[in-house]
Amino acid sequence: MNLMLGDCLERMKEIPDGSVDLTVTSPPYDNLRTYNNSLDWGEHVWKPVLQELFRVTKQGGVVVWVVGDATIKGSETGTSFRQALYAKEVGFNLHDTMIYQKSGAGAVGSNKSYIQNFEYMFIFSVGNIKAFNLIKDRENKKTSTTITNMARGKNNADTSRKYRKITTEKIGRRFNIWLYDQRNNQDAFHLKHPAPFPEKLANDHIISWSNEGDTVLDCFMGSGTTGKMALLNNRKFIGIEKDAGYFEIAKQRLGV
């Protein structure tokens, strides 16, 4: 385990090229919180952060980028989309756009819109994903079904019609919208940070996109949620945090 205090743009320079299997992190959201007045956030920060993440990520590695948008003067900023598109410019594949659905209302939105209760979980990869351990916890309503294949000839005429039966497992892989109760999966350290994500969210991504012995990074470590779940799942961990107070909380939580 390697915990680093300081600006992630400086401290990530110490991480060798192509040495990280998985990053699970949540960057600041459009200055919605001050983080003890230590926050310097904007395009001038997140662009080089994504560049550095691409550099340190192994071929086949993944970055899970959990992010949301502020609503300013009745319009969402769209920063999350700009970040995802820039990640593609840097060289990442946008493997999936997942949703973290909260059990209650979120912190952003307008009183003239529906209640906000989700954040994006962008899954960036460097090339084809190496570790893909699907979580299967969704009960299928049907275990078999019959489908029709049709080949079409000239003038869109049917030339053949074939039927085949596909058997599905009783328990299938989950959808890409993940619902978590924010009141659960928390410990005393978790609650000492203003914007933690659930432990189970970090856990589920870690087991999905990495294997035992892999290296997991969180460049916005906060109170150490990603680190805790990485260690519990027998992964190595690198954590970077700029705020000295949150860094001490993470150290205590991770037993350093």
Image (tube, rainbow, N blue to C red):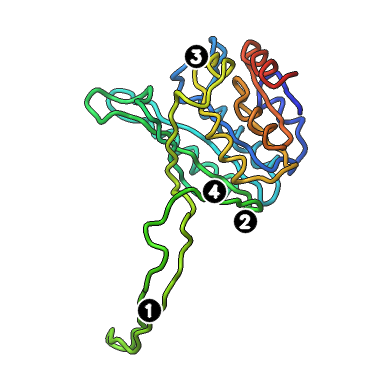
| Residue 86 x/y as whole percent | 52, 41
Q: Earlier in the sequence, mark 2 or mark 4?
A: 2
Helix, strand or loop at label 3? It is: loop
Label 2 crowd bin: few (<14), some (14–19), many (20+), radius 10 Å: few
| Occupied quadrant, residue 249 | top right
Q: Name the residue under label 3.
A: 34
Does the CB distance between marks 3 and 4 fall below 8 Å? no
Q: Which of marks 3 and 1 is nearer the N terminus?
A: 3
Q: Mark 2 points at which residue?
A: 128
Q: Is residue 252 above or below residue 100?
A: above
Label 1 crowd bin: few (<14), some (14–19), many (20+), radius 10 Å: few
Q: Earlier in the sequence, mark 2 or mark 3?
A: 3
Helix, strand or loop at label 1? It is: strand
Amino acid type assigned to the residue bearing label 2 in the image: Asn
Does the CB distance between marks 4 and 1 fall below 8 Å? no
Is 154 positioned to the left or the right of 139 in the image? left
Amino acid type assigned to the residue bearing label 3 in the image: Thr
Label 3 crowd bin: few (<14), some (14–19), many (20+), radius 10 Å: few
